[in-house]
Image (spheres, rainbow, N blue to C red):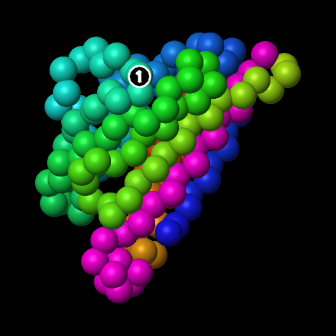
Amino acid sequence: MYQLLRIQRVPRPRAEVFAFFADAANLEALTPPFLAFHIDSPLPIAMRPGAIIDYRLKLHGIPVRWRTVIEAFEPGVRFVDTQARGPYRMWHHEHLFRDTGDGGTEMTDDVHYELPLEPFGRLAHPLVRRALRKVFAYRHQVIAERFH
């Protein structure tokens, strides 16, 4: 199993930042154009445990359908999405939101994932890790611009 951990501080109140992330429609804005990401589920999506989000994207030009399930949803604090169907053997993404004490918010993305087709998945991991880092770097930039 692999982990990707990213922490970002933004100078905006936690309620405002959480509300942005709790709106699934904002996923497209947070995803780099090279993934050709599109939500297939009807919007708006009521974020709650058990909510399902279907979307499609392209990984290295290959069309992929992905379904995530919201496993946990604590308004203002955290939510967890897991992959029910998609390119990973396992995907568990916890989003945490914490007050910084100066009116801002610290956001943590804690992603645990496994790749399919071992041992080939292990061999492909450097490419996957690089791609995920690009995705989260893009996300970091969009968030910094959105919440400046």
| Residue toward you, 123 or 32 | 123
Q: Position of residue 48 (x, y in %)?
A: 41, 22
Q: Which residues are magenta?
A: 103-123
121 magenta-colored: yes
**Horizontally, is 9 left or right of 17 in the view?**
right
Q: Position of residue 72 (x, y in %)?
A: 49, 32
Looking at the image, which residue sits at the far left? 63
Q: Is residue 132 above or below residue 115?
A: above
Q: Is residue 26 visible?
A: no
At x 25%, y 54%, the residue is 86
- Count neighbours of disc 1 (C-alpha within 10 A) and say few if under 14, some if 14 to 19, many if 20 or more: some
Residue type of the residue flagged with mark 1: Arg
Q: Quadrant of residue 121?
A: bottom left
At x 41%, y 54%, the residue is 91
35 magenta-colored: no
At x 67%, y 44%, the residue is 7
Q: Is residue 134 above or below residue 32?
A: below
Q: Is residue 60 above or below residue 99?
A: below
Q: Quadrant of residue 54?
A: top left
Q: Position of residue 75 (x, y in %)?
A: 56, 18
At x 33%, y 27%, the residue is 51
**SS at circle 1:** loop
Q: Is residue 23 visible?
A: yes
Residue under pointer 1: 48
Q: Quadrant of the C terminus?
A: top right
**Horizontally, is 12 left or right of 146 in the view?**
right
Q: Position of residue 50 (x, y in %)?
A: 35, 30
